[in-house]
Image: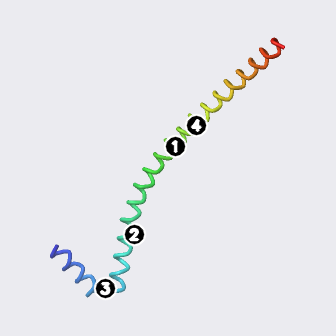
Amino acid sequence: MDSSVTSIVSIIQSLGFPIAVCIYMFWDKQKQDKRNDARDAAQDARHGQYIETLTKLSDGFKTMTNTLTNLCEKLDTREGAVK
């Protein structure tokens, strides 16, 4: 801890406060980019799972629609035969 404080003070004394702040901001931005990359990768994985789930639901709805259509046709046929 003491050596890092000494390093920071030495950078500020040799380069000046504005330059030292620019260096810190650059370093912090690099760390933030790495965190964002990890978060984006996790979101991409969740997005893939979401799309897969929606596809399965869509297929299920198509199957149910076809089943109900066939059932309605059979009921219509039976009603026609009874009349």
Answer above or below: position of 43 versus 73.
Answer: below
Kind of residue sitting beneath label 1: Tyr
Can you identify the residue that label 1 sits on? 50
Position in image of residue 37 (x %, y %):
42, 57
Kindly check if marks 4 and 1 are in contact, taking CB atoms under 8 A apart as contact. Answer: no
> Pointer 4: residues within 10 angstroms few (<14), some, or many (20+)?
few
**Secondary structure beneath label 4:** helix
Kindly check if marks 1 and 3 are in contact, taking CB atoms under 8 A apart as contact. Answer: no
Q: Earlier in the sequence, mark 3 or mark 4?
A: 3
Position in image of residue 56 (x %, y %):
56, 34
Can you identify the residue that label 4 sits on? 55
41 on left or right of 21: right
State how far apart marks 3 and 2 are (Cα). Answer: 20 Å
28 on left or right of 3: right
Q: Residue at x 67, y 24 (%)?
A: 67
When asked about the image quadrant of residue 68, the answer is top right
Q: Earlier in the sequence, mark 3 or mark 2?
A: 3
Which residue is most to the front?
83
Can you identify the residue that label 3 sits on? 15
Q: Earlier in the sequence, mark 2 or mark 1?
A: 2
